[in-house]
Amino acid sequence: APKLTIEGLRATIEGKEILKGLNLEIKGGEVHAIMGPNGTGKSTLASTLMGHPKYEVTDGAVTLDGEDVLEMAVDERARAGLFLAMQYPSEITGVTNADFLRSAINARRGEGNEISLIKFIRLMEGKMKDLEMNPEFMHRYLNEGFSGGEKKRNEILQMLVLEPRLVILDEIDSGLDIDALRIVANGVNAMRSPERGFLIITHYQRLLNYITPDFVHVMMQGRIVKSGGPELAQRLENEGYDWVKEELGIVD
Ligand code: ADP
Ligand code: MG
Ligand code: MG
C-alpha cells in the first residue's frame, strides 16, 4: 500500500513563500480532506506535489514509499502513481481527450506495456458511462468549450482510467450542481481501496457529505494548523474559521 510523507515542506512562488513548513502523512486506504480559507496555499500544495515548475521548493521532504518525490520529474511522479485533478483544468487545442488519455495511460503503464486500442476504447466507454458522460467527449479537444462541470467530470474520468495510487483532488466540487457532485463522489468512492490514498482539497464541507473523510485538516497561512475527524469539517461549515484562529492565536 502507498505511503506519502510530507515533512516541513516550504515552497515559494516568484520569491514569495506560500508553504511554510507543512507536515502530512497519507497512507493507502485513507481519505484526508484539507479545508482552509482562500489564498492559504491549498492549490500551491497540490501543484508543488505534482512538480509544477512555477513553484520552488526551498525546504522539507516529500516521499512516496520512501522514494524522493521532489527529485522526480513531472512524468516520473505520474508514473509513480501521483495524480492531481486540478481546480482549473487547462484547455489544450489540437489534442483530443482520447489522445490525451491514451498517452497518459501509456506513460503510467510504461514502455512495452501499452494498452491496445480496443482495450482502451472499451475502458473509456465503460468509465464514461459510469460518469454519465456523452461518448462524444472522447473526440473533443481537451477541455475546450467544456462547461465547468464537464471539466470536473473529465478530471474524474482521468482518475478512473489511470488508477493512481495517490489521488489529489483540488476543489473538484466547485462549479458542480448536486447531480454532478453525486456522480463525481460516486466515482471517487468506487476508487477507495487499501491500495490508494486520497487528498481532497475543498473550500466547502458539502463534498464531504458525499465522500466521508477519515481525517480533516485545517490549512492556514501555508501549514496545517489543526487536524481531526469529519466532525471538524462540520464545525467549520457551521462556524467558519475564526474560532480556529482564536484558538491558535493566529493573526492575519
Ligand atoms: P488556495 O488554493 O488556498 O486558495 P493558492 O495556493 O491558490 O491558495 O494561493 C496561495 C497564495 O499564493 C495566494 O496568496 C496567492 O495570491 C499567491 N499566488 C498565487 N499565484 C501567485 C503568483 N503568480 N505570484 C505571487 N503570488 C501568487
Ligand atoms: Mg482558491
Ligand atoms: Mg485553490
Image (cartoon, helix red, strand yellow):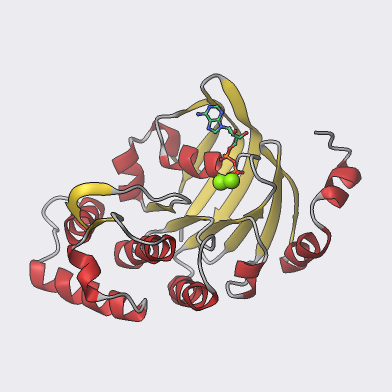
- Lateral position of residue 22 relative to residue 113, left or right: right
Picture quarter containing residue 129? Answer: bottom left
Residue at image point 39% right, 65% down: 156
Pinpoint residue 160: horizontal percent, then vertical percent.
Answer: 35, 68
- Lateral position of residue 95 relative to residue 251, left or right: left
Residue 28 vs residue 205, the one in the foreground: 205
How many numbered marks have been drawn onto this rendered protein structure? Answer: 0
Residue at image point 64% right, 74% down: 209
- Lateral position of residue 154 relative to residue 142, left or right: right
Pinpoint residue 172: horizontal percent, then vertical percent.
Answer: 50, 60
Pinpoint residue 148: horizontal percent, then vertical percent.
Answer: 43, 60
Residue 174 vs residue 210, the one in the foreground: 174
Whether 178 is drawn above or below 77: the answer is below
- Lateral position of residue 194 relative to residue 108, left or right: right
Residue 82 vs residue 159, the one in the foreground: 159
Residue 230 vs residue 210, the one in the foreground: 210
Q: Locate the C terminus and report the quarter of the image it occupies.
A: top right
Picture quarter containing residue 112? Answer: bottom left
Residue at image point 39% right, 66% down: 153
Residue at image point 77% right, 59% down: 236
Whether 15 is drawn above or below 96: the answer is above
